[in-house]
Image (cartoon, rainbow, N blue to C red):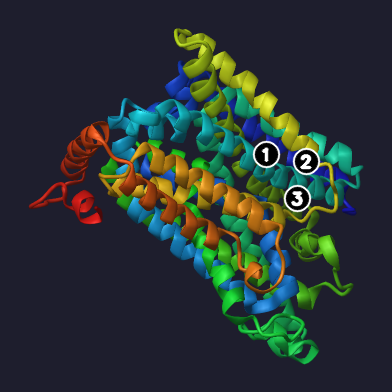
């Protein structure tokens, strides 16, 4: 527990006051469901970049990743390298196409709605199945954020874990339900800047103190040289090809994360994506380096070794040891910012799916604008409940929960979305096969051990999902699929026009893939 709970309480109160004001302002700007789900597709480059990045990284960036680096050493650079490359590829391959395609296909507001509009031959099934998969994996993902919040409040204020998790979920639900996408995006900008500043200051302060006391990386090597070898685990065993591929493969998950893809749909113009990509990539590079450096510094600064799930408190302990209580309070608020910036986005996407893809599509087709906004706010509460229940296990590791959900989204939606944006001859049944095969592969692979099954489940999930899409799409085609192909070519031409690209054959990407 912190030795200065009153100071921490005041700094957290100030943080919540800022978030609350942003949420209230966004509430006044939210008029209809497109505003609530995508902010009316009018956010700029900086907001899109920082919001996507902050919602991507979550509490695991300041808890899970420093804890992993603390326990595993420089092995963590493989994970960081995969995430950095994945960020850049996602902005390069997906962002502009999804922005244009989602709007052109009947102004789709959610990922299931886009897939349903893209493949009208099986639209209703795509909408339902995709929605259920999103809700399942977001329960896991959101619970990871609530576990992180519970650990933060428990460590800082010394309160019972149950009350710590309860406080975290209430704070997130309130401004998400009222402010919608605009509140989530604008608070993410503030939270993203706070996270980056914190991840610069903490390792700099730690290593400056280490230098004063004569401690260097040689001390880590003297205690355990394996921590400084990227090709070995902490216990001295070889990381091996499976280990390296499993860490690098985290980058493949970006193509299927609905809460990140929503930022691509919401940016005001495809022309702003190039600048947004640069901002996002730079932010990710800075924060990943800071998180790993913090974990390594913790090995030297923290005298009592951290074991098991307690290793994920290394960043919290560093801030309390290195900074004045007032400064430490604001830096600890950055951890809360990381948690809230992702959990709010996940709750919003889940709420959007229930409201747009279930309530309006299946129950109330003629629901009015105000009714849909109210339904969106109510469903935020409904979705938070099971995530709260899953988060009640205090022994859960944040990184493990995130890894499971990340793989599920990446395998279920990554190949499906990419091929839907680039392959004109893909079919609705192919999309369904990709979602189901990818998601089920992750779930089954997760429960198998030994040998090849040590490979991160996202890799077999993506491979089998891609294979299923191609095989089913090639074998099951008809007149309706030919019409969908022609429609795809028209939409791709529009994308070429809006992005200023020149092509001698506008259907080239689609036909070449066939």
Residue pictured at 44% horizontal, 25% vertical: 124
Disc 2 is placed on an element classified as helix
**Among numbered discs 3 and 2, the one appearing first in the sequence:** 3
**Among numbered discs 1 and 2, the one appearing first in the sequence:** 1
Q: CA distance from mark 1 to mark 2?
A: 8 Å
Residue pictured at 33% horizontal, 40% vertical: 427
Please identify the quarter of the rendering in which residue 171 is found: top right
Mark number displayed over residue 390: 2
Q: Callout 3: 10 Å neighbours few (<14), some, many (20+)?
A: many
Please identify the quarter of the rendering in which residue 123 is found: top left
Q: 112 or 73: which is nearer to us?
A: 112
Mark number displayed over residue 484: none
Q: Callout 1: 10 Å neighbours few (<14), some, many (20+)?
A: many
Q: Looking at the picture, how far across and down is residue 391, in whole percent?
A: 78, 42
Residue 62 seen anywhere in this rendered image of the structure = no
Callout 1 touching callout 3 (CB < 8 Å): no
Q: Looking at the picture, how far across and down is residue 67, in whole percent?
A: 73, 65
Q: Residue furthest left?
A: 504
Q: Looking at the picture, how far across and down is residue 108, in whole percent?
A: 38, 28
Disc 1 is placed on an element classified as helix
**Among numbered discs 1 and 3, the one appearing first in the sequence:** 1
Q: CA distance from mark 1 to mark 3?
A: 29 Å
Q: Is 128 placed above or below 273 here?
A: above
Residue at numbered disc 3:
329
Q: Looking at the picture, how far across and down is residue 278, in whole percent?
A: 37, 57
Q: Is 146 placed above or below 277 here?
A: above
Residue at numbered disc 1:
139
Callout 1 touching callout 2 (CB < 8 Å): yes
Q: Is residue 89 left or right of residue 203?
A: left
Q: Is residue 40 left or right of residue 481?
A: right
Residue pictured at 59% horizontal, 75% vertical: 242
């Amino acid at each position: 527990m912190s030795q200065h709970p009153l100071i921490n309480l005041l700094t957290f109160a100030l943080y919540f006051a800022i978030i609350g004001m942003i949420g209230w302002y966004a509430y006044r700007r939210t008029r209809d469901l497109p505003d609530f789900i995508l902010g009316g597709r009018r956010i700029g480059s900086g907001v899109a970049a920082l919001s996507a990045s902050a919602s991507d990284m979550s509490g695991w960036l300041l808890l899970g990743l420093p804890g992993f680096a603390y326990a595993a050493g420089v092995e963590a650079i493989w994970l960081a390298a995969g995430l950095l490359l994945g960020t850049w590829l996602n902005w390069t391959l997906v962002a502009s196409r999804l922005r244009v395609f989602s709007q052109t296909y009947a102004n789709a507001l959610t990922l299931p709605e886009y897939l349903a509009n893209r493949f009208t031959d099986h639209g209703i099934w795509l909408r339902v199945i995709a929605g259920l998969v999103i809700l399942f994996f977001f329960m896991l993902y959101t619970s990871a954020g609530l576990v992180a919040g519970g650990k933060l409040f428990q460590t800082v204020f010394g309160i019972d874990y149950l009350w710590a998790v309860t406080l975290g979920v209430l704070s997130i639900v309130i401004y998400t339900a009222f402010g919608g996408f605009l509140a989530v995006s604008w608070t993410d900008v503030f939270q993203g800047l706070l996270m980056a500043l914190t991840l610069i200051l903490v390792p700099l302060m730690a290593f400056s103190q280490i230098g004063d006391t004569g401690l260097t990386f040689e001390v880590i090597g003297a205690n355990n040289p394996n921590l400084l070898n990227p090709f070995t685990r902490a216990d001295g065993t070889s990381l091996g090809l499976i280990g390296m591929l499993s860490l690098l493969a985290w980058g493949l998950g970006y193509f299927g994360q609905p809460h990140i893809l929503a930022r691509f749909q919401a940016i005001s113009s495809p022309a702003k994506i190039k600048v947004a990509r640069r901002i996002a990539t730079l932010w990710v590079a800075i924060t990943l380096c800071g998180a790993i450096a913090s974990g390594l510094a913790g090995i030297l600064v923290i005298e009592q070794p951290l074991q098991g799930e307690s290793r994920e408190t290394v960043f919290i302990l560093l801030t309390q040891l290195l900074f004045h209580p007032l400064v430490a309070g604001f830096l600890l608020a950055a951890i809360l910012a990381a948690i809230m910036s992702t959990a709010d986005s996940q709750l919003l996407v889940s709420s959007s799916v229930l409201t747009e893809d279930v309530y309006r599509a299946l129950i109330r087709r003629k629901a009015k604008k105000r009714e849909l906004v109210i339904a969106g706010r109510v469903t935020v509460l409904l979705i938070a409940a099971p995530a709260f229940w899953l988060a009640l296990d205090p022994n859960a590791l944040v990184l493990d929960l995130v890894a499971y959900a990340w793989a599920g989204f990446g395998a279920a939606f990554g190949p499906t979305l990419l091929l839907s944006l680039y392959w004109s001859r893909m079919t609705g049944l192919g999309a369904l096969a990709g979602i189901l095969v990818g998601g089920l592969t992750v779930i089954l692979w997760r429960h198998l051990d030994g040998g090849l099954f040590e490979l991160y489940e996202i890799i077999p999930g993506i491979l089998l999902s891609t294979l299923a899409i191609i095989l089913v799409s090639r074998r099951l085609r008809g007149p309706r699929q030919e019409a969908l192909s022609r429609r795809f070519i028209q939409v791709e031409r529009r994308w070429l026009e809006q992005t200023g690209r020149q092509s001698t054959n506008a259907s080239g990407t689609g036909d070449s893939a066939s």
